Amino acid sequence: MPAFNRSKLSMDHLRNFILWSAVLISAIAVVYSNHLCREKYSELSYLEKDGMNLDINYGRLLLEYSAWGSMHRVEKIARENQKMVIPQSTDIIAVDQNRLEIN
């Protein structure tokens, strides 16, 4: 075989090796990218589910907060536990801020 054919043959082998290496690296990159995409999608699904659970708990807490702070409940506790009563109109004294004298 002449030297020209050997160098052409080795160049063909080198070119094929480089092309197949590029194809293999590209395939591995696609598989890795697909893996990362699925991993991130799984994490996103988990976080969305967690967010929905937090929204549900927040709604429950708002309901509980409104129940604890209702005027009826506050008045009942004031009457029963603190022995407070609603004052009669004769017991109410209006104070004029302009007439206050500080001693």
Image (tube, rainbow, N blue to C red):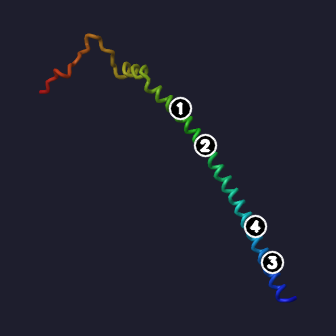
Q: Badge 4: how crowded within 10 Å, few (<14), some, or many (20+)?
A: few
Which residue is situated farthest in the left direction here? 103
Q: Amino acid at mark 4?
A: Val
Q: Earlier in the sequence, mark 1 or mark 3?
A: 3
Position of 25 with respect to 80 (left or right) is right
Foreground mark, 2 or 3? Answer: 3
**Residue shown at the point (77%, 74%) measured from the top left:** 17
Q: Amino acid at mark 1?
A: Arg
According to the image, label 2 marks what residue?
48
According to the image, label 3 marks what residue?
12
Identify the secondary structure beneath mark 2.
helix
Q: Earlier in the sequence, mark 4 or mark 2?
A: 4
Foreground mark, 1 or 4? Answer: 4
According to the image, label 4 marks what residue?
23
Q: Earlier in the sequence, mark 2 or mark 3?
A: 3
Foreground mark, 1 or 3? Answer: 3
Q: Amino acid at mark 2?
A: Glu
**Residue shown at the point (29%, 11%) measured from the top left:** 88
According to the image, label 1 marks what residue?
60
In the image, 47 versus 3, the foreground residue is 3
Position of 37 with respect to 92 (left or right) is right
Instruction: Report the Cα–Cα distance between label 2 and label 3.
Output: 53 Å
Residue 45, picture quadrant: top right
Of the 4 image quadrants, the one containing the C terminus is top left
